[in-house]
Amino acid sequence: MTLAIAAIVVWIGLWALNVMLARWLPERQARIVVPIVFGLTLVLVVELLVTGLKVPFVILPKPSEMVARLFTSLPMLWEDFAQTILKGALTGYIMGCAAALFVAFLASRSDFLRRGLLPLGNFVAALPVVGLAPIMVMWFGFGWESKAAIVVSMCFFPMLVNSVQGLAATSAIERDLFKTYAATPVQQLSLLRLPAAMPFILNGLKVCTPLALIGAIVAEFFGSPFLGMGFRIKTSVGTLSLDLVWAEIIVAALAGTGFFGLLLIVERSLTFWHPSQRR
Amino acid sequence: MIRWLSQTVVPVVTILVALVAIWYAAAIPMNSARTYMMAPDDAEIPFSELVTDTWSQKKPQLPLPHQIVAEVKKQATFSWIWKEKRRGYKRSLIYHTWVTLSSTLLGFALGLVLGVSLSLAIVYSRVMDLSVMPWVITSQTIPIIAIAPMIIVLMAPLGFTGLMPKGVISMYLSYFPIVIGMTKGLRSSDPILEDQMKTWSATAFQTFWLLRLPSALPFLFPAMKIGLAAALVGAVVAELPSGARAGLGARLLVFSYRSETIPMWANLIAAAILAGLLVVSFSLLERALNRRLGFRNAAEASS
């Protein structure tokens, strides 16, 4: 009980610290320090509450136990990571986004194709495409190929819609200017359309990141070899080794956040000219 | 009208027809393995026979549109209302669509409440903005399906089983676009108008109610539409690890274990129709509300 009260005290204390940090630190440091303090506060409060209220292990393990498990079963987690994220999600992500970009290039050359694809793509992007997962498992087997296939089908349409919009984002004046300079179609694409489309393309890539992870893990619920993150989560819930489940969740979170952060860095260096990047 | 026909309907229909044609053509090689397996050795199968067989199998690799439509028609009955369930589970597609719809709507409502209140806190408190906003974005890079079983395990001892955990999982996906859209919207009011409110010595609440909220609505509605679609994805995904027996996702799992492909596709089509209906009905609501409040459409406003 005392620990539960300590949790409340810690919460209030660290929140007050955050209020002060937000007020006194310069903008740039505050943007980094304040969220970290907030995250640590949450972890600390959960740890104290779980210990203080004696929450059983089979409901919620302590955060410290999760992290401990993360380090003790590192080799297994790495194998699952390689199977699900490197082989399944990443391959599918690259193939799906590349295919969508290719179709978007075709659509940018033909107005008819663009008018036909855009409403359809918008509609399909709103559908629960993840439901195709069992069908992909049936077609491509239990291995990582079926996971890549579902990721391709989940990423394709959001990416397509964004890229088509992006490639159409040039103004008539800019296109006329390129025509006056007698630019070839390739030059027009590489120097005008592609740079103008970059913010949209990167936005599509960002939207697809969590979709790829969800697709790869969901597909493992429908059949997988004896490894993979979704498989491990499914079986570990069954055997009540919840610390392992949470360790997998931490790995998935780190992978997703890491990749997203990478995209943000790429975005900042490629589209530094865009108004949304102004600081 | 004619412009709309030639510039939108004709291209869309052309591509749809092309897709269906590709579908029928692809079914022949994809389903042919079974045809050859059933035929006696070395038997030459004429092409016409191959086509009729691959287009009418019971458990094809790729079911054809006409088979799926027939299955949807067969299963979309209301008989579950008055008939007792016979084989341990209910067969009606409408019943399972309704189950998924109910957790979608619950998740969307929860997500709307959470999203709007979070964005209010973010807009009005700098500490909240600094400390919560990065975690809101991080939360979406964590795949929901990894956490879904844990949400169910966590909520069971609190007395929440069945609908509520599924709603929470839907909420996790649907609150995000709402936070982002609403925050952007609340910050989009014209600074000149804000100064004007100040000159009129409007209270903070008046500024919020009369200026910031109305200018946030054109951002909120598209965000809500995305949130609604995300809530549906969440509802389908939530039924996979929860051991649920009803709902489109749960049925998908059942049929995939039995490799009954035609009902699987019928389920997918039901999910697609549900998504379409949700988005269309929400768009109508949006248009009616906008007209009522005297707004132009967000699309018109931004152009």
Image: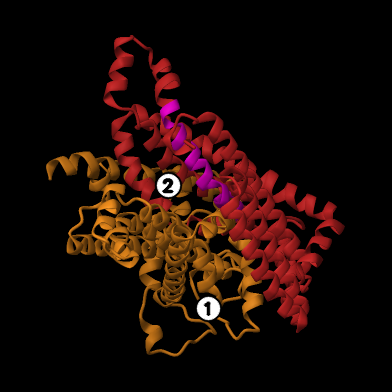
Chain colours: A red, B orange
Residue most toward the right? Answer: A72
Frontmost of labels 2 and 1 is 1
- The reply to whether discs 2 and 1 touch (Cβ–Cβ < 8 Å) is no
Secondary structure beneath dot 1 equals: helix
For badge 1, the amino acid type reads: Met
Residue B23 is labelled as 2
If you read the primary sequence from the N terminus, does the residue marked by circle 2 or circle 1 appear first?
Answer: 2
Residue most toward the left? Answer: B1
Residue A158 is labelled as none
* Residue A196 lies in the magenta-colored region: yes
From this viewpoint, is residue B41 visible? no
Q: Which residues, given as a range, are shown in magenta?
A: A195-214
Residue B164 is labelled as 1
Residue shown at 23% from the left, 52% from the top = B297
Residue shown at 39% from the left, 58% from the top = B182
**In the image, is residue A53 above or below residue A31?**
below
Chain under callout 2:
B
Q: Is residue A58 left or right of residue B99?
A: right
From this viewpoint, is residue A70 visible? yes
Q: Nearer the viewer, residue B267 or A207?
A: A207
Residue B293: x percent and y percent? 20, 63
Q: Residues within 10 Å of mark 2 (few under 14, many from 20)?
A: some
Q: Nearer the viewer, residue A261 or A197?
A: A261
Secondary structure beneath dot 2 equals: helix
Q: Residues within 10 Å of mark 1 (few under 14, many from 20)?
A: some
Q: Is residue B45 left or right of residue A111?
A: right
